[in-house]
Image (cartoon, grey):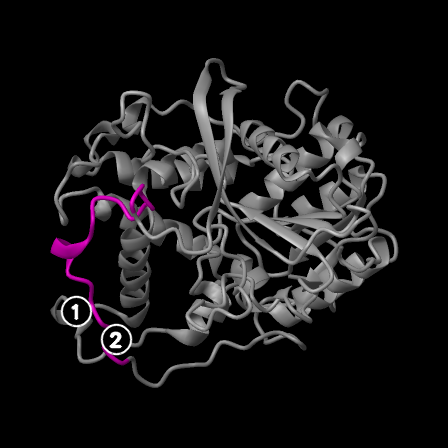
Amino acid sequence: MADDSRTAGAARGAAPAPGTAAPGAGAARTGATAAPGAGATRTGATAAAPLTRRHARREVDPATIPASGAWREGDDPGPRRFADIGALPLEAGGRLPHVRLAYETWGELNEAGDNAVLVLHALTGDAHVTAHPGDQSDDEGWWGQVVGPGRAIDTTKYFVVAPNVLGGCQGSTGPSSPAPDGSPWGSRFPVLTVRDQVAAEIELADLLGIERWALVVGASMGGHRVLEWAVMAPERVDAIAVVATNAQASAEQVAWAHSQLGAIRLDPNWRGGDYYDAAPGHGPHAGLGLARQIAHTTYRSPAELEERFGRLPQHAEEPLSGGRYAVQSYLDHHASKLAVRFDAGSYVALTQTMITHDVGRDRGGVEAALAQVRAATLVVAVDSDRLFFPDESERIAAAVPGAGPVAYVRSDHGHDGFLVEHDQVAALVGRFLRSVAPVRPAR
């Protein structure tokens, strides 16, 4: 659920030192080292700088916010590529008559075809994981410190593929995409599940000529798809890395998501999901922004918010006279930033896939499903995560036969630590990838 947008690399975000085992909220595992509390900055973690005053943020004029921030036909595709995979039967019934996935690639597939890596993004992310060499105008991407030339996932050695998820809004088929009648799907867009998303990605792999992935890696919502890849297509996955995620949505996660969905659906400009013809300023940006504020609070830790903001007022505003505290301005900023670049319909569709996520559905339960995983497995948790608690990672590691002890990222940033603590994440993922998939030169 975290924001892995292109601007997210600067601050996101509990457990022992990188690469060591640690218990989650439940009982400690044999040989595990206890995680420190969230109060003090942990060794290796990126500290949140306390503030002495808050500068005024540049406000976005609500009248200028588009009805949707989705990529639409006719927009500059940038480095996106597109794969038309045809009709897709859906787990909940029915079918999408035509599915397109947007994706980006880096590096080259080697002659043996054994150096392909699939990177799967979180809720409001996209396919732009890292910059493309030689393009000076290209931004770093949402995981540019982990993926790229000489990085942990080295694009000079590995062929990296990153799709925009089915249901998303950056080129893949979603609510903002044209339905067969040419108008946006909107309220007619069908219910998707994580398994539908992976089924589409399997079709993409076929079109790209990739028989097996050396590694499938993803965090947060992306981790849901990683686990489904390992269960749905075990013969096509050599190794997986699941980061800050779970195997089954918890009641608390459903509760947080419920309030976010309600915020969007209660916006009068939501119009039941059929708002794509609205003028700027008249789309459901208020509901989407409120949903973002609710979600973003779960992405950060209480300790970080207190240290960064405390009870400081925002710039010259006076809370006793109706002004805002700095933390309120911070959330307002993230609300408007998301409304400009994302789509409310996709937010609803993807959040629905998250709350129905259950790798054990119709497979005899979570443990029985995870026992089917044959891939070498790295499980990573963030020690201060209050959205996907560390004990959920422990559950995955305990049930997957090929998993070692949970590796912990130390962070004061909560769930978003998987984006902020890129040095720690890169060390864990890089070491694991080198151990399971030594590469041959690209053809």
The mark that comes first in sequence, 2 or 1, is 2
Q: Can residue 373 be spotted in the picture?
A: yes
Q: Residues within 10 Å of mark 2 (few under 14, many from 20)?
A: many
Question: Residue pushed farthest right?
Answer: 31
Per the rendered image, the range of residues in magenta is: 55-74
Q: Main secondary structure of the magenta part?
A: loop
Question: Residue pushed farthest bottom?
Answer: 52
Residue at point 18% right, 80% down?
316
Label drawn at residue 323: 1
Label drawn at residue 266: none
- Front-most of 184 and 137? 137
Residue at point 23% right, 28% down?
272
Q: Position of residue 31 (x, y in %)?
A: 87, 57
Q: Three-letter amino acid code at disc 2?
A: Pro
Q: Residues within 10 Å of mark 1 (few under 14, many from 20)?
A: some
Q: Can residue 36 be spotted in the picture?
A: no
- Which quadrant is home to the C terminus? bottom right
Q: Quadrant of residue 283?
A: top left
418 lies left or right of 139: right
Question: Residue pushed farthest top?
Answer: 94
Q: Position of residue 213 (x, y in %)?
A: 73, 43
Q: Which residue is mark 2?
A: 313
CB-based contact (under 8 Å), mark 2 and mark 1 = yes
Q: Position of residue 222 (x, y in %)?
A: 57, 45
217 lies left or right of 103: right
Question: Residue pushed farthest front?
Answer: 443
- Front-most of 154 and 362? 154
Q: Is residue 89 above or below residue 173?
A: above
Residue 109 magenta: no
Q: Is residue 152 above or below residue 23?
A: below
Q: Three-letter amino acid code at disc 1?
A: Gly
Q: Secondary structure at mark 1?
A: loop
